[in-house]
């Protein structure tokens, strides 16, 4: 049994043109968030009493190369209850569930990929061969949006002082409550159970549950720097400020680098460090030991577009700009420095770089140009096709079910 509406791949309800008009994903970024320049909106939020920053981007849906249509998926009945009342006074369509009939991309692990589309949240359970699409009410803002995935829910929280929503698994969207009902960023907390949001002043980020209630944990940061915080890949924060980039935790701040952060991951950082004579090097830093390893390679990173390091610490997925100004995705071996270009078209109009690694480091997912989702086989750097239609995806996040 499944919550929500169940349909075949050719169900008319899967067609974007026939869906309800209900809402406006990485770089895990479940996924990991890149280092951003958010100074441009800081004065406006200070005037409103909140300083905040967030992730967005245009992007994704279906990858270009079509793979053969799998054998006929099982026919499933469609529920007659297509609209259900949700908490917070909302009336939202029930989730639409598609059973493919076989694992997607041959994945056997239980991890899941989430994407935020213009009018819904998409949940892909690869091993089960199941895609769930949940409508979310239209956002009352066209500004940046936080997209965070936790255990049992996905969260859509606009930067502005307008309503945000939580999508419990298998249920319609609900309005965010408590501290989550206010503006500002919502960044992933430890254990996929909570999020960091601005506290009562601009000198702290506080940890709250999915219900918006404070857990008691907080991180103190210098005044006026909330707009410079980002996820660190393991449930805490990174802070970009005068002097470099700092690891921010409840116990205090610790400097990571005096230069820019090129990529972030759960076990390593990739940085660009320069000496007093401006001789610069690409450096891999072990987060546990502080050991530094210089790579014989250069990352020509577009401004504000850092990448993500795989969970096993072996590969960095970074955006690079070539001499013609074309932005591409590269897979960088953090042991040898070997650089492989991925054939994924990138839209330079977006501000951030949504990408997400699978927990086993086998797959990199990229929200690229033309509203396409690109699954990349990390072993070959080849783009694969999901084999199922998706709406254009703006942001990506991974849920690790282990």
Image (tube, rainbow, N blue to C red):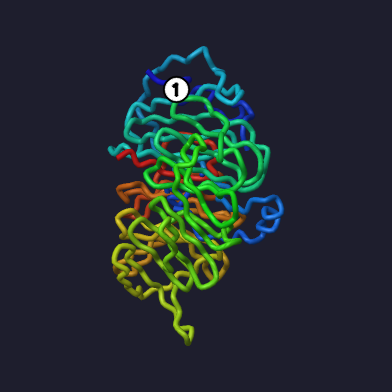
- Residue behind mark 1: 8
Q: Is residue 291 among the parts visible in the rendering?
A: yes
Q: For the point 67% across and 56% down, which residue is it?
A: 41
Number of numbered tags placed on the structure image: 1
Quarter of the image that includes the N terminus: top left
Q: Is residue 64 among the parts visible in the rendering?
A: no
Q: Nearer the viewer, residue 171 or 106?
A: 171
- In the rendered structure, the answer to whether residue 22 lies left or right of residue 297 reads right
Above or below, 117 relative to 76: below
Above or below, 265 relative to 335: above
- Determine which quarter of the picture holds residue 149: top left
Above or below, 235 relative to 255: above
The picture places residue 369, in percent across and down from the top left corner, at 55, 50
Q: For the point 45% across and 42% down, which residue is it?
A: 215
The picture places residue 56, in percent across and down from the top left corner, at 57, 49
- In the rendered structure, the answer to whether residue 177 lies left or right of residue 188 reads right
Q: For the point 38% across and 50% down, which residue is it?
A: 357
The picture places residue 206, in percent across and down from the top left corner, at 50, 48
């Amino acid at each position: 049994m499944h919550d929500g509406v169940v349909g075949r791949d050719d169900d008319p309800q899967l067609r974007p043109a026939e869906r309800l008009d209900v809402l406006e994903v990485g770089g895990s970024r479940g996924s990991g968030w890149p280092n951003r320049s958010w100074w441009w909106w800081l004065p406006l939020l200070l005037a409103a009493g909140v300083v905040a920053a967030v992730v967005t981007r245009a992007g994704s849906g279906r990858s270009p190369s079509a793979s053969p249509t799998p054998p006929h998926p099982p026919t499933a009945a469609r529920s007659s209850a297509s609209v259900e009342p949700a908490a917070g006074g909302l009336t939202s369509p029930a989730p639409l569930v598609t059973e493919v009939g076989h694992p997607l991309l041959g994945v056997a692990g239980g991890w899941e990929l989430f994407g935020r589309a213009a009018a819904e949240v998409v949940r892909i359970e690869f091993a089960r061969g199941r895609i769930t699409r949940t409508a979310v009410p239209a956002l009352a803002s066209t500004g940046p949006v936080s997209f965070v995935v936790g255990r049992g829910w996905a969260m859509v929280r606009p930067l502005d002082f307008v309503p945000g929503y939580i999508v419990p698994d298998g249920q319609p969207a609900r309005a965010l409550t408590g501290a989550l009902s206010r503006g500002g960023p919502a960044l992933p907390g430890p254990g996929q159970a909570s999020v960091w949001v601005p506290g009562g002043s601009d000198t702290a980020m506080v940890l709250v549950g999915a219900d918006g209630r404070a857990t008691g944990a907080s991180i103190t940061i210098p005044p006026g720097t909330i707009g410079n915080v980002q996820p660190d890949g393991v449930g805490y924060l990174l802070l970009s400020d005068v002097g470099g980039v700092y690891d921010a935790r409840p116990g205090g701040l610790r400097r990571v680098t005096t230069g820019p952060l090129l990529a972030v991951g759960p076990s390593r950082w990739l940085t660009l460090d320069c000496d007093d004579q401006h001789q610069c090097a690409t450096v891999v830093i072990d987060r546990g030991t502080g050991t530094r390893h210089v790579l014989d390679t250069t990352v020509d990173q577009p401004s504000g577009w850092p990448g993500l390091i795989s969970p096993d610490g072996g590969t960095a997925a970074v955006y690079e700009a070539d001499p013609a100004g074309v932005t591409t995705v590269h897979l960088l071996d953090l042991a040898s420095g070997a650089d492989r270009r991925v054939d994924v078209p990138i839209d330079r109009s977006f501000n951030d770089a949504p990408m997400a690694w699978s927990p086993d480091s086998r797959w990199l997912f990229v929200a690229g140009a033309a509203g396409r989702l690109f699954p990349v086989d990390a072993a070959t750097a080849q783009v694969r096709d999901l084999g199922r239609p998706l709406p254009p995806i703006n942001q990506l996040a991974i849920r690790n079910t282990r």
